[in-house]
Amino acid sequence: MTIVEGLGFGPLLGVFLTCRHEREMIRKKRPDGVRSRHHPSNRDMTGSRLDRPLIEDAVTYLSPLLVPTPVEDSPALSRILGVPVILKLEFMQPTGSFKVRGALFRLSRLTSEERARGVVTCSAGNHGLGMAHGASQLNVPLTVYVPASIDPVKLDGMLSLGAEVVRSPFPGYDETAEWARRQPATDTSTWISAFDDFAIMAGNGGTLAAEILQQVSAPAAVVLPVGGGGMAAGAGYVLKETRPSPQLIACQHVLSPGLALSLESGEAVTRLPAIETVARGVEGGMGSLCFSVLESRVDQVALVSEQEIMSAMLWMLREHRYLVEPSAAVAVAACLEKRFIPPGGPLVLILSGRNVAPAVVKKVLCHESD
């Protein structure tokens, strides 16, 4: 019996079954950083590559800690897109977003010495919340560097969980991350990326995709918002190892399309100028490790505007009575605006988070009245 079977994830076994020719084609395309599941020596505590053992470890560790988030049908989106649309309610995680998955799993892989020295990270908000949640449980000192534009709700959440939060002088994520890496605290503490880390990918996206495959029979596509690419990379790895493979549809802000630009150039565009947006979670460049996984696994990229994101927030509130955060609404907007070609089958839309400040809600409501 495999780990996933023992956890009740039996169908996930099919996720990793591909024909020999397809496996060979994937192996030839795959950069050195991403290894095949056929190397037992790949299992390690640092998560130095994304593979089946790492994702199985994530499933094992998180299963007793996090209750699977529910799914529900969206008749309204099904009518718009002409295919069954199923919502994955990741905003019901204890910290209000999917980011708690990767944070908990990555922290679990620290050595005792690393735990004692503490952890440093940079976050637009939800990753910091997830890390603060996990660090408080594991008694790990945590410092989170955040952009000057941090959402007050997310900032207050991190502080309430005991994290030390340092606000940068920069409004954007990429500038803040570069600045944070130059601070003295990073010399002795362990740096953990919000997305460009294989253990983060396995937790955030790998376990989420595995959960979806348990809850939804033969999904034809998974639609999700993409910023740095951690959730998309982990989900893409799992989804593309199953047969038939669901499409991976990545949704981005049109003014900060890190993945789209990376695909166009053939290499990761890791830094983008800061933009003025309510969807801070998808602003910035693409992780280089994330792109090494995603490059051959993403099927479509859908771009949406600021106005469309705010309209999608209101639509979700009216139609489903869910107040999702702007970054989650990016994927909703892509569906409402039909920015991708729906495959002929069930489509799973990931609602990634709910953490939104009253000021943003007011701005969105004012946008509706304009």
Image (tube, helix red, strand yellow):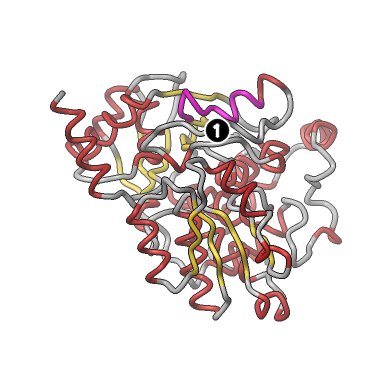
Q: Which residues are magenta?
A: 252-262
Which residue is the site of mark 1?
248
Q: Position of residue 364 (x, y in %)?
A: 23, 35
- The N terminus - image quarter: bottom right
- The C terminus - image quarter: top left
Q: Is residue 1 left or right of residue 307?
A: right
In the image as oriented, which residue stretches furthest toward the front?
A: 169
Q: Position of residue 223 (x, y in %)?
A: 46, 34
Q: Is residue 365 left or right of residue 157?
A: left
Instruction: Determine the secondary structure under disc 1.
Output: strand
Q: Which corner quadrant of the image does residue 62 belong to?
A: bottom right
Q: Crowdedness of circle 1 by 10 Å Cα count: few (<14), some, many (20+)? A: many
As for residue 255 lying within the magenta part, the answer is yes
**Residue at x 85%, y 42% (from the top left corner):** 32
**Residue at x 53%, y 73% (from the top left corner):** 135
For residue 343, say whether it is visible: no
Type of amino acid at the residue the image marks with label 1: Leu
Q: Which corner quadrant of the image does residue 313 belong to?
A: top left
Q: Is residue 128 left or right of residue 291?
A: left
Q: Nearer the viewer, residue 349 or 75?
A: 349
For residue 238, say whether it is visible: yes
As for residue 330 lying within the magenta part, the answer is no
**Residue at x 30%, y 28% (from the top left corner):** 78
**Residue at x 48%, y 30% (from the top left corner):** 252
